[in-house]
Amino acid sequence: MFPSIGNVKIFLCRQPTDMRKSYDTLAALATGELEENPLSGALFVFLNRPRNRIKILYYESGGYCLWMKRLECGSFPLPPGDGKKQLIDRGTLAMLLDGLKIVKMKRFSLQNN
């Protein structure tokens, strides 16, 4: 689906986005609204107002890639947060794409104290 996203930053745009926008306009949103470099290789996640469509923009060598998903019913749940953008991890992205509502998360350390 996506390139190896082990250490890639994932930015969620929390403001609704017009899903008619394509590569260049979404890249301009990443630069202007989110104040991030769309050529960095980061993933930029955009949702429409009813949150039944999602687009993910990222840059690979040679050009932009755009991934889209449309739900036939229901909506994508936003993780808790505020502001224009939110830095999320790949687990949160996976839960978002699977439609899991993220109420409260706490990461436990696997190291012995």
Image (tube, helix red, strand yellow):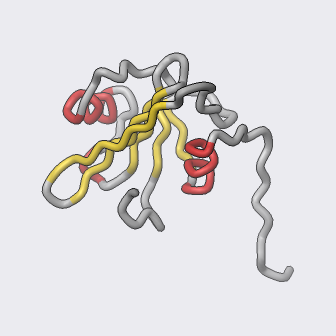
Residue 28 on image: x %, y %: 25, 30
- Give left or right: position of 23 versus 97: left
Extreme-left residue of the structure: 62
Quarter of the view holding residue 29: top left
Extreme-bottom residue of the structure: 112
Extreme-right residue of the structure: 113
Count of labels in the image:
0
Quarter of the view holding residue 108: bottom right
- Give left or right: position of 91 versus 39: right
Instruction: Please state, as top left, top right, bottom left or bottom right, where the C terminus lies in the image.
Output: bottom right
Residue 35 on image: x %, y %: 36, 35
Between 52 and 78, the one nearer to me in the picture: 52
| Residue at the (64%, 32%) spot, across then down | 77
- Give left or right: position of 101 versus 83: right
Residue 80 on image: x %, y %: 69, 34
As drawn, 12 above or below 48: below
Instruction: Please state, as top left, top right, bottom left or bottom right, where the N terminus lies in the image.
Output: bottom left
As drawn, 4 above or below 57: below
| Residue at the (78%, 38%) spot, across then down | 103
| Residue at the (24%, 57%) spot, across then down | 60
| Residue at the (31%, 48%) spot, across then down | 58
